[in-house]
Amino acid sequence: MQPHARFRPLPWLACVALAAVSAHGLAQDHGHGHGHDHAQDHAAASVSATAAPAQRWAADANLSHGMAQVRASVEALGHAEHGHMGPGQVVVLARTMDGYIGDILATCKLDPRADAALHGVLAQLLRGTDALKQGESLPVALATMRQALEQYPRLFDDPKWHALAPSGH
């Protein structure tokens, strides 16, 4: 059906737009209105081993599913490191990842500090996808994304999460 097919890309584009807006506004109050300490948000958004909370935050089903999709995409990009994927395929996969990240942002319903930490991880992933879409170094972009994915299980208790395969495989 012609009219329905026209509207199909709009939710995806909205997710990508939401992801882009969220990535650029992470250091600012992003309007949750919870009346919490924004300095804590900024500290939690720092994606480093020291940013891990004493107790990891629970990952809901949407977050778990979205991060699994992102992880699978990063693992698939590992094939490009070995020349098994062309530049056009890399860009398509990066755009697909933007959609997954947009879905995560659209469905994220977390404690404000967990939300800030998640946004830090997602911003790092988006830096990697942006680099790939701009044709920048694949190894550098993948390293950025892999670092973000290494932080996720330090911050979130996701029973379905498994570690990334070593980059040489």
Image: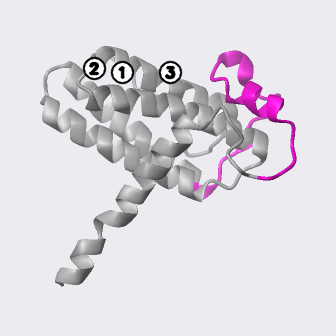
Indicate the quadrant where residue 73 lies: top left
The local crowd at label 2, few if under 14, some if 14 to 19, many if 20 or more residues have their Cα within 10 Å, is some
Question: Which amino acid type is shown beneath numbered disc 3?
Answer: Gln
Dot in front, 3 or 1: 1
Q: Residue at x 44, y 34 (%)?
A: 126
In this rendering, does residue 168 appear at all? no
What color scheme is it? one colour
Residue that label 1 marks: 141
Indicate the quadrant where residue 113 lies: top right
In what quadrant of the picture does the C terminus appear? Answer: top left
Question: Which amino acid type is shown beneath numbered disc 2?
Answer: Leu
Dot in front, 2 or 3: 2
The span from disc 1 to disc 2 (Cα, nearest Å) is 5 Å
Q: Residue at x 22, y 75 (%)?
A: 5
Task: Please state if 48 lies on the left or on the right of 147 as rendered.
Answer: right
The span from disc 2 to disc 3 (Cα, nearest Å) is 14 Å
Residue that label 3 marks: 147
Point out which mark residue 23 bears. none
In this rendering, does residue 110 appear at all? yes
Q: Residue at x 63, y 38 (%)?
A: 118
Q: Secondary structure at mark 1?
A: helix
Can you give x and y, in whole percent of width and height, for residue 120 in the image?
A: 61, 31
Q: Secondary structure at mark 2?
A: helix
Image: magenta residue range: 33-62
Contact between labelled residues 2 and 1, with CB atoms less than 8 Å apart: yes
Give 4 or 61, whichever is nearer the viewer: 4
Give 16 or 29, whichever is nearer the viewer: 29
The local crowd at label 3, few if under 14, some if 14 to 19, many if 20 or more residues have their Cα within 10 Å, is some
Residue that label 2 marks: 138
Question: Which amino acid type is shown beneath numbered disc 1?
Answer: Ala
Give 101 or 85, whichever is nearer the viewer: 101
Is 49 covered by the magenta stretch? Answer: yes
